[in-house]
Image (tube, grey):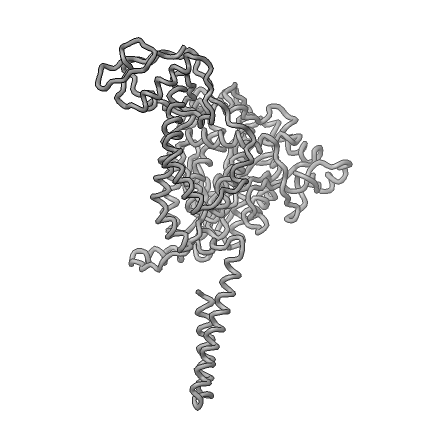
Amino acid sequence: FFFFFFFSAKNTKQQHHHTQLLTHNHSRYTAYTTHLHFTMIRKSIALLALVVASADAFKFMSNWQPPKILTDEQKVKMADMEERFGDKKLVVITGCSSGLGRQTVKNLLATNKYHVVGAVRDVEKMEAVAEIEEFDMDNFQIMECELNSFESVEKFCNELEEYQLGKPIDRLLCNAGVYQPSLPYAKWSVDGHEQTMQINFLSHFLMVSKLIDRMRDAPDPRVVMVGSVTGNDNTVGGGGVYPIADLKNLDGFKAGFNNPVAMADGYGFIGAKAYKDSKLSLMMMSNFLHAKYNKNTGIAFSSIYPGCIAETPLFREKRAWFRKYFPIFMKYITGGYVGVEEAGQRLFQVAHDPRCSKSGVYWSWNGGPREGRGAAALEKSGQISGGGGAGGGWDSIYENDQSDKVNNLELCVDLFKTATDITGAQWPDAKTFTSPCPTLTVISTISENMIAREELKRMAERPGFNSDGTPIKLGKRRKAALIADKVIVKGVLGNTVGRVGKVAGRLLLGKVPETATTGSFQEEKPLEEEQNATPQSKETSSPVAEIEITQPPTKTIDIVNQGDKSALEEEIFDQVFANGKKSDHSSKEKEWKVDVEEKELATAS
């Protein structure tokens, strides 16, 4: 439509110009203007065809809405939103009063392109840090969020919604984390869950479920999970140092993960493993959310490993000797040391770099162990370029490989379900945009009731299942009723009225293609006989009414013995004569009379 009006305006000017030149010849003027209009229409159609010919033909129309008349209140709200955010992107980051999060906020604000909301446990500490770092408080908002409490997370999300004033969230950085490797016992959250798993994973899981709908309308929305090499057992750091990250069958989560269940796998508590399991869970969930929501929301879900930040408050619960010598070990022995400033630049890069808008990626940077590193390590303060550690700069980012555990889709599904139960998260439906084609809308409206009616007919029968969903087996008595139904309904009626209908159908619809009737990889399995079949009681209703058919009957009737034949004959007579009952006379000929006392038919043995 834009192109149509553009060419309309352009050609209107041309018409005015030629009107002055051609007023003396009305017929030539009329022909010329007609030509202009046809040219304009052809151009508009051609441009529209180019648009709809792409893979996302109608996706550009997904956010189209009819014009709205804004109320005074809405106008004021929009003005307030413009005043608060301007043209800046809105970023939400957890755990930014120290370490990695603090440096990330510093880098985000330095660009003057972001408005950052810091979700922190200690508001006063965050205020002090913001003053020390001289954060621009016009673009930095501090909000309380205690990840030890699901109630606090929900309260934060509600307060954030009021603060947004309708502006969509552009980035959600799930950064906050705790590491308690020295604990000989588990510590519990407000909700009765082991703290490390709740703070690092479960509360972020709940937060994403609350905010995902508020990110759909952003032009380039991203959710970033801060993972760890320790959650990947395909590396030395993740697979060579005990304990190993492993959720096993999620027995702990399936049991509710309430005190005293302290581990996701349901086994004994180890502080270091709780941390590794939480990072494994974050990376698995990033992959799952990518598969479930990326295409229909446009949100990019990714995880990162910023490197081993050896000098960070994350290790505040480690012993003093470890905090002193671990950075030295990482700098000069392994070469995998990463400073907190560089790590902050890496998380900032994934939030800012256009290359990182790709979803379903585990981002890492070159750096780390290298042969012959001694002298170079001393010269560069331990920063040796290579995979995983420090160095390499902005362009050293790459898409890293994840372990089989992280990529276990079946376990990802179980993790999503159990975490949803534990947190009470409510996830939006994953709906793909449907073309707004008017023809499709009209046809769908007309056929909706018919489709629903036909589907109800199909669902009225559950071949092979009882009413409780368990598979059924048929005894000889029920087989006889099944065959009788075939002889009468499919045989007698099918060869009269049914034949006429089939002929008419073939004439109207044509022959069914051979490809529609072939290609089955298995023959239809015969009905299994019911083991230990019990006799029918006198109160039992008509056999035909109580039968649930497991498979369509075969085309031939297999009479095995005289007993089966007798039962079959009786069943056919029962169905032919609705009120017919067998005579009390014990003669071989069948005598029938109406409205007499019902008598049970013998069951074929």
Give the x, y percent position of residue 463: 42, 27
Q: Is residue 53 left or right of residue 483?
A: right
Q: Nearer the viewer, residue 17 or 132?
A: 17
Give the x, y percent position of residue 310: 61, 35
Residue at 31% in and 24% down: 576
Image vertical order of residue 51 relative to residue 587, above or below: below
Q: Which residue is the extreme one toward the bottom?
A: 24
Give the x, y percent position of residue 386: 70, 41
Residue at 25% in and 15% down: 598
Q: Is residue 313 visible?
A: no
Q: Nearer the viewer, residue 452 or 330?
A: 452
Q: Quadrant of the C terminus?
A: top left
Q: Nearer the viewer, residue 279 or 575?
A: 575
Q: Is residue 57 left or right of residue 478?
A: right
Residue at 43% in and 32% down: 420
Image vertical order of residue 211 relative to residue 410, above or below: below
Q: Quadrant of the N terminus?
A: bottom left
Q: Nearer the viewer, residue 152 or 598?
A: 598
Give the x, y percent position of residue 430: 44, 42
